[in-house]
Image (cartoon, rainbow, N blue to C red):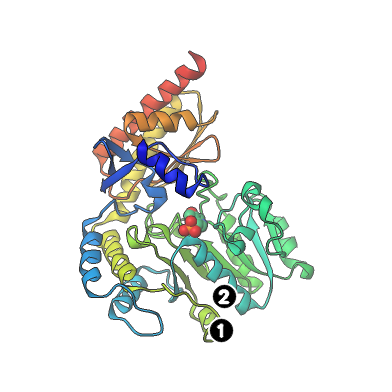
């Protein structure tokens, strides 16, 4: 583990890290320095959406790198234009204008600023358990106290509510003192442990926002682009937001984010009121176009639904088999397995056994496999997870 130690001495220990040194990836698999193969159910934290080194993405980046790598938004570019046209074909119907960013948190920052400008109101309603990033604005609407507490004060007018408090939401919005203009929600909460909203929740919130002229932001950074078996997680409840935040897998692994919105929201901003130097650079746009092609032309959204069902059913079978599994939930390739105990040993055992898994909190296994996963790879993942959970049960109960 020579290079882990070396890296640590330069980057410190801000990231929770796993003792594995990855050098190569293809599809659902990655390899370490000793050429050991791993099934990647961590999926690069959801970034390896269309698979590691997706052929379309590799080709697009390789060709684009030879033509033009940087091109500021202050000039026009055909590669960017063609990405925008392609994205428009998959975008929710009323969300026809976009602001380019370079990461998830930046997409949220843009959304919060644009909503503020449009509504003229500083109050924001966010959800208990919501995760939107760690820069000051997005951190202000992120719930977890662990991330917030050392950085107070954050944005002042944020109110948090839980899913079960649909009436409280009403009260908060109707109280003029709160000056609420914006509601921000992850349609399915990722970071917090694949938490699904109650059946009518998103529809009720949508109606409330429409009736009160509030901007509804969906953070689909993790749940979007086919992850849940539909292009957008909001579609499972037939709800369309006013602004949608994207990042993670949108450019096949190249850093890129997008804040997509109703045209009238973007149109209320004046020149210079928001910007980003790397925004809409041709390398990311070429990779983004290739990613959309992979999602649509290679049928990855359909695959996510089909394979995700098989994966979830397999996990539900494991829940019947092992009492240390408390719950299995999620849609498509966004799955969570809630355990009765800390999952740290399971993750480390996974590395030993050739499978990378992600965690949420202390006791939830999170699975964000690439959407290119096939049935054989799902079955192999399930076989390995079965072994890991059996080992954990032995460790706990002998
Ligand atoms: C990952 C994530 C973010 C933050 O994205 P970064 O690129 O790490 O800033 C925000 N919201 C959700 C839902 C995410 O999953």
Residue 381: x and y, percent? 32, 35
Closer to the camera, 296 or 64?
64
Q: Is residue 49 visible?
A: yes
Q: Quadrant of the N terminus?
A: top left
Residue 257: x and y, percent? 43, 65
Instruction: Answer left or right for 301 relative to 273.
Output: left
Mark closest to the chain's N terminus, 1 or 2: 2
Q: Quadrant of residue 283?
A: bottom left
Mark 2 residue's CB less than 8 Å from ligand 1: no
Against 15, is 168 above or below? below
Which numbered dot is residue 186? none
Mark 1 element type: loop
Instruction: Answer left or right for 376 relative to 265.
Output: left
What residue appears at the point 66 percent right and 51 percent down from the top-left corner?
162
Q: Which residue is mark 2?
A: 114
Mark 2 element type: helix
Instruction: Report if the CB atoms under discs 1 and 2 are less than 8 Å apart.
Output: yes
Residue 60: x and y, percent? 23, 66
Q: Residues within 10 Å of mark 1 (few under 14, many from 20)?
A: few
What residue appears at the point 26 percent right and 40 percent down from the top-left corner?
375
Q: Residues within 10 Å of mark 2 (few under 14, many from 20)?
A: many
Which numbered dot is residue 268? 1
Q: Residue furthest top?
A: 398
Against 154, is 395 above or below? above
């Amino acid at each position: 583990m020579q290079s882990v130690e070396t890296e640590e001495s330069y980057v410190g220990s801000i990231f929770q890290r796993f003792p594995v040194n990855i050098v190569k990836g293809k599809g659902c698999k990655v390899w370490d320095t000793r050429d050991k193969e791993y099934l990647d159910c961590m999926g690069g934290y959801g970034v390896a959406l269309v698979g590691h080194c997706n052929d379309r993405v590799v080709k697009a980046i390789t060709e684009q790198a030879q033509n033009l790598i940087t091109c500021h938004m202050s000039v026009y570019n055909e590669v960017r234009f063609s990405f925008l046209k392609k994205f428009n074909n998959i975008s929710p119907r009323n969300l026809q204008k976009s602001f380019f960013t370079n990461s998830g948190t930046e997409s949220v920052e843009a959304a919060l600023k644009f909503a503020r400008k449009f509504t003229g109101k500083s109050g924001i309603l966010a959800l208990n358990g919501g995760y939107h990033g760690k820069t000051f604005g997005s951190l202000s609407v992120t719930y977890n106290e662990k991330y917030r507490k050392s950085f107070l004060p954050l944005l002042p007018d944020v109110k948090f509510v839980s899913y079960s408090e649909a009436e409280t939401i009403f009260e908060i919005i109707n109280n003029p003192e709160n000056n609420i203009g914006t509601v921000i929600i992850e349609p399915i909460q990722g970071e917090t442990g694949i938490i699904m909203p109650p059946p009518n929740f998103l529809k009720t919130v949508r109606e409330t926002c429409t009736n009160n002229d509030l901007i509804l932001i969906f953070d689909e950074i993790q749940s979007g682009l086919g992850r849940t078996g539909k292009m957008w997680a909001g579609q499972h409840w037939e709800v369309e937001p006013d602004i949608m935040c994207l990042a993670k897998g949108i450019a096949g692994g190249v850093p890129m984010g997008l804040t997509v919105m109703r045209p009238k929201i973007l149109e209320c901003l004046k020149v210079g009121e928001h910007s980003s130097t790397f925004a809409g650079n041709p390398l990311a746009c070429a990779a983004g176009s290739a990613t959309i092609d992979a999602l649509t032309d290679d049928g990855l959204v359909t695959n996510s639904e089909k394979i995700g069902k098989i994966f979830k059913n397999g996990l539900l079978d494991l829940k019947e088999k092992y009492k240390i599994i408390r719950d299995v939930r999620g849609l498509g390739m966004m799955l969570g397995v809630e355990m009765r105990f800390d999952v740290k040993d399971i993750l480390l055992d996974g590395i030993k056994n050739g499978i990378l898994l992600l965690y949420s909190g202390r006791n939830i296994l999170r699975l964000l496999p690439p959407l290119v996963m096939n049935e054989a790879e799902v079955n192999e993942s399930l076989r390995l997870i079965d072994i890991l959970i059996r080992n954990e049960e032995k460790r706990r109960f002998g």
